Amino acid sequence: MSSDKFDFAIAIGGAAGQGIATPGNVLARIFIRRGLHLNAYNAYQSIIRGGHIFLTMRISDQPVSNHGDKLDLLVCLNQDTMDRHLGLMGPGTRVLYNSDTITPGTPEDGVHLCPLPINELTDNNRNKLVQNTVALGTILYLLDVDFQILEDIITMQFRRKGQEVIDENVGVARAGYDYAAAHFEPCSQSLPSGGKPLAVWTGNDALAMGGASAGVKFYCAYPMSPSTGVLHWMAQNARELGIMVRQVEDEIGVANMAIGAAHVGCRSMCATSGGGFALMTEAVGSAAMMEIPVVFIDVQRAGPSTGVPTKTEQGDLWQILGASQGDFERFIVAPTDALDAFHTLPELFNLVDHCQCPGIVISDLLISEGTFSVDPDAIDMQPGIDRGELITQSSNGASDIPTGSQLANGHGLIGAPSNGYLRYVNTESGISPRALPGVEGYAHVVATDEHDEDGVLVSDEFTNPHKRRKMVEKRARKFKNIAQRIEPPALSGASAEDAEITLIGWGSTRGVIREAVEILHRDGVAVNHLPIKWIVPLHVDAIQEVFDKAKKTVIVENNHSGQFHRYLRSETGLTADGHIRKYDGEPFMPHHIVDGVRELLAGTTDIYVPYQEVIV
């Protein structure tokens, strides 16, 4: 991002239970109302009280795709935050803290310490959370924002708690605002205004809304961080949208319930994290065998096992690729940001309905629990819906069931049925017209064992090798040309001929790589970037073309073993020249990738692992 643009980062640090979310929400509302873009990342621990929490909010008058490299303003709610993060603050930055309880260390030259005598400003209010509201008033003064704006937001934030609570919070915020005006120098950057007001959402909100826009009418889940936000949104909006939502006893039940709802014609989905998805995997295969379209969401967190439940990682790729046993067709897609996740869900539902197979979304904590601004006009809750070869009309008796020749004309039937409806009729495309259970004249058998065209189990007569082969090949034909229905990845940045290095990432790394490419360009290093979103099907030809022209290829991913690189090799035989990997639970920052590119170009290493400066 160029230096003449407004680009400001605020961090609020404290312990769980110190109410960090409230000032974060208030500030977010102020920023988006002024048309500013927001990207917020909350580094927190998996305990209810205690543990360090560090919320970073980056705001700009231009879109921001990550939480950035720098901090301009640090709010310390406890001594631990001061001790951990003061060293990150550079010249011109400001540090707010409660001078009654926190002792500052020795900052770098040019750092402005802004002590707030909380007891004096609040008349010795015993509510420990009152320091947050004082800090809000101080922040607004430092950013040259009129106090009335904060008063309006506080009134809205606390209106359910009554006028007395509103007056108390407005009063202490005013005290912080006035104290800052008398004692502190404002920031060099004032908060701009005048842009189109924006909305704010999390990645989990985007996934839930994307499902709702796609026509999901059944959602179920077992709460598992960091996917639980999808369940919260669905439950909150279920009645208004006509969606049945169920919290189930475990992920095995979740998966089977979602498949059952999809079987009867409902667009159905569920979400979990890696440990929960491990329990779902047999059901994923059953959906493939029964040719039932259903969507699973895996929000990755650091593993294995319970791992680090509140930290991000891209470590589930091979679990998703290997979900369930046997060979079967499934879609796997890794959205690149929240808005992309929203748009991906309707596209994925159309694809799974077309191919009558499961689809899997791979998100991660960074996207799903991040908070982002969004232009409301970019959210289309009525996208195009294509249910594929779906039979919903009654035939009014067996005589009206389409004959073998009629099916052949419409669907490329291979071998006409002698009589009745064949749910798994063998077609040239591999796609069989799907009748919903209960539609008159279309009775059929559905089971998880291998079956013939009529649904009768192959092993009920004897294990017929010819029928088994026929059905395996039928299902496989559904994916023969499926990549043509999906947009391939596109190269951005320097041209293929000019780039010194080509960065390849997948899923949530797109935004941070994009900014790293911009930084490198400004420094005279020609770099380009190929972001991968669709894992299955993989656009092999498009990727091969990029590799053929690249001088040096580097894969960036948020795991230890290079899972996407291993998958790319298995599918294409291509090998990258270098790697940038991170697996400490925290996401990439732009300078991590910039530093990695420099090290790789210098030839000092083939695998660069950045050091995480922020201790969270």
Image (cartoon, rainbow, N blue to C red):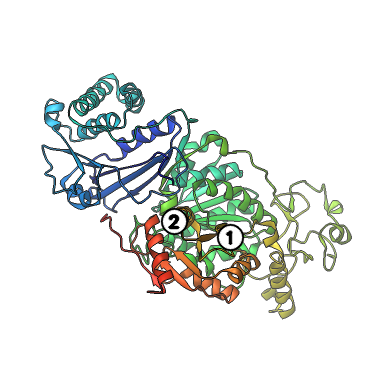
- Residues 600 and 74: in front is 600
State the mark number for residue 113. Answer: none
Residue 351 in which image quadrant: bottom right
Q: Is residue 355 left or right of residue 55?
A: right
Q: Are marks 1 and 2 in contact (CB under 8 Å)?
A: no
What residue is disc 1 on? 495
Q: Give the image location of residue 132, x and y in percent.
A: 24, 35
- Residues 188 and 349: in front is 188
Q: Is residue 135 visible?
A: yes
For badge 1, the amino acid type reads Ser
For badge 2, the amino acid type reads Ala
Q: Is residue 333 left or right of residue 31?
A: right
Q: Residue at x 76, y 49 (%)?
A: 440
What residue is disc 2 on? 516
Q: Give the image location of residue 306, x and y in percent.
A: 35, 62
Q: Is residue 416 left or right of residue 183?
A: right
Q: Give the image location of residue 413, x and y in percent.
A: 82, 64
Q: Nearer the viewer, mark 1 or mark 2?
A: 1
Residue 593 in which image quadrant: bottom left
Q: Residue at x 60, y 69 (%)?
A: 549
Question: Residue 132, relative to residue 589: is it above or below?
Answer: above
Q: Where is the C terminus found, in terms of image quarters?
A: bottom left
Q: Give the image location of residue 361, x and y in percent.
A: 53, 56
Q: Residue at x 52, y 47 (%)?
A: 219
